[in-house]
Image (tube, rainbow, N blue to C red):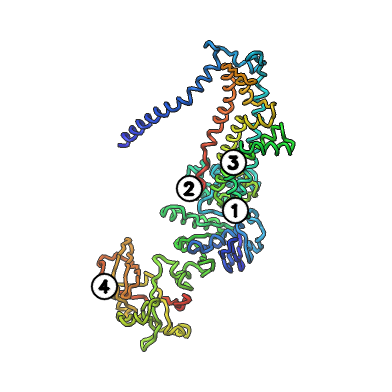
Amino acid sequence: MLIKKREDQVKGAWRYIFLLSIFSLIIVIPYAWLVARAFTTNTGEFTLSNWSFMWKETPYFRGLVLPVVWKSFGLSLLFASGTAILMLALTIPTAYAISRTKFPGRPLLTKLMIILDAFPTVALLIGFFYVLNAFGLMNSYFGVILIKVGMSLPGTIWLMKSFFDHVPWELEWAAIVDGATRFKTFTKIIIPVVKPGAAVILINSFLSGWGEYILLNLFIIGKSTTMSTFIGMTLNNEGKIAVPFGILAAASLLYVIPVVILFSISQKTLLSVQQGGIKN
Amino acid sequence: MATVGLNEVVKVYDNGVLAVQDFNLQIEDKEFIILVGPSGCGKSTVLRMIAGLESITEGEISIDGKVVNNVSAKDRDIAMVFQNYALYPHMTVYDNIAFALKMRKVPKDEIDNRVRHAAETLQLTELLDRKPKQLSGGQRQRVALGRAIVREPKVFLMDEPLSNLDAKLRVEMRVQITKLYQQLQTTIIYVTHDQTEAMTMGTRIVVMKDGIVQQVATPTDLYNLPVNLFVARFIGMPPMNTIEGRLGKDEAGLFVCAEPIGTDSKEQSTHAVDSVKLYLLPRYETEEVLAHLDRPVILGIRPEHIYMEPEDVERYSDTKLQVKAEVVEMLGAESYLYLKTQWDSNLTARINDQVHDVRYDDMITVALDPDHIHLFDYETEVSIIH
């Protein structure tokens, strides 16, 4: 009886795996093309010449030259990490305070956060321009980080707040009674418990910084050299469309690699929700 | 290993709710004090105030003679066990137990000794490397106890530690905590809403209701000499039976004329079933009791003091009642009889035997043990006779 049921389950599982495989082809095929194209010439032979931007300046279209990629790569890395770290540094204490303390205006603040979160960044571009100018942050990567963080902060605080809301008071009380200070309780008990939440925010903001294009090209006027711009250069120059597919594929693949690494490292944390210490 | 004093302690929450009123209690060294009461009676609030997790609105709390109102929780040297265990989910059992010692900067090898000793006491040695989520409810609660005993604190505070366990485990853990208390010889303050836990574990019990202390007494005194109707009905399982009536006196002595008080008494008396007089023993004929003559009272009788054997009924013929049997519950060694009186109020009798010959709707005669009759004022519910 039990064995039969298990057999049924296995049969059912195969059906799902088959369906999911078909759907995943839609996503997998472009990536497969990307990998294939990055290592072949226009005529289909294997080559590594598409990757030459990794070690030397590479001409790619009617005398236009691609610079060596590492400056752009490093800059993107710095920009994305900066965004992620600042985001986390602001989100965690704010969300904790909103979750744990009662202060006048708290309900209004939480409502405002939802409204602010719904505000599209693009709608405020002109406003940002004036603000950045007033603070002397035009053409500064830090200025763009501030905009990025500021715009996503309400949403991430809201997300993080719900993680803190699920940490029972008893856990904090137990630590305090055990002789931990408020700060130690926060760092040794609370933070480890909400680690999956923090990881989600860290990864999301890193990716959003890694993929940023519009804000960078608007506010670092004509001088942005991050990865997204680097790839953009191969596509469009002075209104002329130039598509050296091999180089484009290689550059895109390079652009994807950090994301893949990040996900494979953090997957375990993302899925490990700390539980079992509390019974409700 | 300390005394705890609560002096006129009051707690008012920010939203204006008065949670605890004028709480006075002197807890001696090595006492096992139980705070018991229905949910929302303020017992957990008292415990949290002692722990320092809740501010004190008025009054003083002292530990070892030192007022601790302004001492923070971490410096009060108390240990606390919570209803939902509150184990640190990301730490192993070992680290959970060691946490408090690490916070107090105890040397590493001493921590190791103490953790292993505590684990041995609670049979946790095998589980030291596990995470809380790999443990059963009973094991988790033992870890929570281990986290408390490893500290060797002045006072143990326990907030309904067994409420989340199933019935069988609860009985086991109850025994384990009692053993632990005998081993540790320390002061324990224990909060529960379960009167069985209170009666079996405590050396003294504090019964609370609506933030007010009703009675502080040893389990036996609480059971035999409840000061009011609330305590009388709260302690004991099944609860004490109550019969409403009027205190009267005739040539045979003082009696309670059983009749429901709440409804219109005139209407009641017109189609009265033969009014039942339950006579009180002559020794109760004191000035204090006579002051209630002709006034409504509540007669209380515990289930085990209702008898149905013919010779008992004969002996206590002054307090016998005609009742209708509704349900008979056989528990093996004893039986519960759920009975209905002629004036439609319910009685429960506990018979120390197996009862086979009573069926639904049978009319039987029972007698109340006059030595164990309680009498309460109808309005104030304060005890008149116990």
Q: How far apart are marks 1 and 4 (CA)?
A: 60 Å
Q: Name the residue under label 4.
A: B363
- Badge 4 density bin: few <14, some 14–19, many ≥20, Cα 10 Å: some
Mark 4 vs mark 3: give the one in front: 3
Q: Name the residue under label 2.
A: B139
Q: Are marks 1 and 4 on the same chain?
A: yes
Inspect the image, locate mark 1, and give the three-letter code of the amino acid beneath it.
Glu
Q: Do labels 4 and 2 share a chain?
A: yes
Q: Name the residue under label 3.
A: A119
Seen from the viewer's position, the closer of residues A19 and B100 is: A19
Task: Look at the numbered disc 3 and give the secondary structure of its residue.
Answer: loop
- Which residue: 44% across, 54% down? B170
Seen from the viewer's position, the closer of residues B343 and B88 is: B343
Residue B224 lies, with reference to residue A26, above or below; the image says below
Mark 2 vs mark 1: give the one in front: 2
Task: Look at the numbered disc 2 and give the secondary structure of its residue.
Answer: helix
Mark 1 vs mark 4: give the one in front: 4
Q: Name the residue under label 1.
A: B152
**Chain ID at mark 1:** B
**Chain ID at mark 4:** B
Residue furthest out toward the front = A239
